Image (cartoon, rainbow, N blue to C red):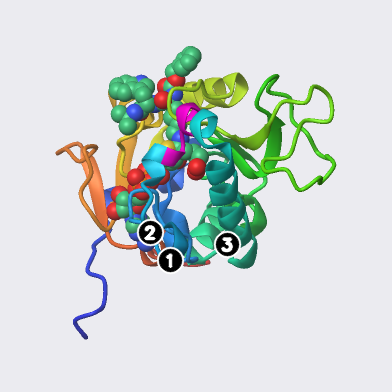
Amino acid sequence: MSNDQPTFSIPPELCDVLRSARHVVVLTGAGISAESGVPTFRDGLTGLWAQYNPQELATPRAFARDPKLVWEWYLWRRELVSKVQPNAGHQALVELERRVPRLTLITQNVDGLHQRAGNRRVVEIHGNIMRTKCFGEGTVIERWEETGEIPPRCPKCGSMLRPDVVWFGEALPDQAFNEAALASLACNVFLSIGTSGLVEPAASFPLVALRRGARVALINPEETPLLSENVDFLRGPAGSILPALLRETWPNS
Ligand code: BJW
């Protein structure tokens, strides 16, 4: 075998539990979109944006201080996301949705790639980069006049417009949070995929599932704080691990 092959083994017990699960929860983070060419959040930015730290741009304070900078950063990311395609990891989750009686796909990603891959129900806990809302009133805005002002202004109240994403210090959308929290309490299997597990409240969802007796697996090339003796660690890129997990769980299809 060549050295650059990912090395991972999938515990047969995980496949058994997955095969008979009534409710599976998947939590995804930036790592699942990395193989599509979307930089992860904690990787340094490249090119024009190399000098900035994403964690310092994704805050209401950064937007209030320099709205033009933050708006242009999101414009750059919107363009990037619109040019990339879902990868084998995203596709495997579409297949998983077909295989299990109930799948709750919770994503921290704002790139919409799960929906573009074909997952029907996606719980977006950090919003969606393609939507825009009013910074003053929080309402989603679909059309506005391009006057050359950056950021553009809300046609209803004149406040600045901003992307409809959740920044540090902001509350998650109620419905998405409730759905994610309830599913974590009720599932039989929880797969945490491509997330550093550093950002709350998402980082707590697999711990809730673990405490309630679910089988929890971590899919990531790197160790994360979730790793413990009670968690299956499938070490490697999601685009290889997820198709292998499906093949080994449902070998005859
Ligand atoms: C691969 C791979 C491959 C690479 N395959 N894997 C409790 C304790 C301490 C702090 C807090 C707490 N509760 C709340 C906080 C504060 C804060 C927080 O968590 N801070 C931490 C930094 C400590 N949380 C919040 O502020 C949240 N709000 C909140 O809790 O509100 C409470 C409230 C209630 C009522 C009123 C007001 C407030 C909001 C968090 C919002 C996070 N937003 C962002 C930006 C979204 C918009 C945007 O994209 O611009 O979400 S931050 C950023 O981090 C983004 C991500 O979704 C999120 C998570 O990152 P993720 O996905 O894990 O990415 P990375 O880059 O960290 O990791 C990538 C991983 O992939 C790595 O592990 C790689 O190894 C792996 N990987 N290639 C698989 N091929």
Q: Which residue is mark 1?
A: 47
Q: Is residue 128 left or right of residue 168?
A: right
Q: Residue furthest bottom?
A: 2
> Which residue, given by chain and number where applicable, does mark 2 sit on?
50
**Residue 184 appears in the figure:** no
Residue at image location 59% in from the left, 52% down from the top: 114
Dot 2 falls on a residue whose secondary structure is loop
Quarter of the image where ligand 1 sits: top left
100 up-or-down from 213: above or below? below
Q: Depth check: 241 or 59 in front? A: 59
Per the rendering, the mark at residue 152 is none
Residue numbers of the magenta segment: 57-62
Report the Cα–Cα distance between label 3 and label 2.
Answer: 15 Å
From the viewer's perspective, is the residue at label 3 or at label 2 nearer? 2
Instruction: Identify the mark at residue 80; answer none if there is no mark.
Output: 3
Q: Position of residue 54 (x, y in %)?
A: 40, 45
Q: The disc labelled 3 sits on which kind of residue?
A: Leu
Does mark 3 have its CB less than 8 Å from ligand 1? no
Q: Main secondary structure of the magenta part?
A: helix
The quarter of the image holding the N terminus is bottom left
x and y, in percent, of residue 158 in the image:
78, 26
Q: Dot 3 surroundings within 10 Å: few (below 14), some, or many (20 or more)?
A: some
